[in-house]
Amino acid sequence: MSRHPFRPGSFVLGLLVVLAAVGWFVSESDVASSRELAVAGAIILIVGGVAGIALTLRRTS
């Protein structure tokens, strides 16, 4: 059996689904408020965007 190639698009989409499920669970269990989750989500998206830009620049140089 051979391994299939890594597909970053599928990985990112799966990661977003998992993060959404964790966010729903945390908000339903009263661990964090919706405002705290919104701030955490924004930070995660910003860090992911910066990492994506850095990886893109690294590949082209």
Image (spheres, grey):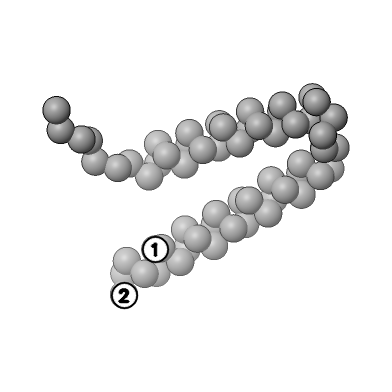
So how many labels did they put on this image?
Answer: 2
Q: Nearer the viewer, residue 31 or 23?
A: 31
Q: Nearer the viewer, residue 29 or 61?
A: 29
Which three-letter amino acid code belongs to the residue tagged 2?
Ser
As drawn, the residue found furthest toward the bottom would be: 61
Image x and y of residue 20, in percent: 63, 32
Say above or below: 42 vs 53.
above
- Residue on which disc 1 sits: 56
Callout 1 environment at 10 Å: few (<14), some (14 to 19), or many (20+)? few
Q: Secondary structure at mark 1?
A: helix
Image x and y of residue 16, in percent: 55, 37
- Residue on which disc 2 sits: 61
State left or right for residue 52 relative to residue 60. right
Callout 2 environment at 10 Å: few (<14), some (14 to 19), or many (20+)? few
On-image quarter of the N terminus: top left
State left or right for residue 42 relative to residue 29. left
Q: Residue at x 69, y 46 (%)?
A: 41
Image x and y of residue 4, in percent: 22, 35
Q: Are marks 1 and 2 in contact (CB under 8 Å)?
A: no
CA–CA distance between discs 1 and 2? Answer: 9 Å
Which three-letter amino acid code belongs to the residue tagged 1?
Thr
Q: Quadrant of residue 47?
A: bottom right
Q: Residue at x 54, y 57 (%)?
A: 49
Q: Secondary structure at mark 2?
A: loop
Which of disc 2 and disc 1 is earlier in sequence?
1
Q: Residue at x 85, y 30 (%)?
A: 30
Say above or below: 32 vs 60.
above
On-image quarter of the C terminus: bottom left
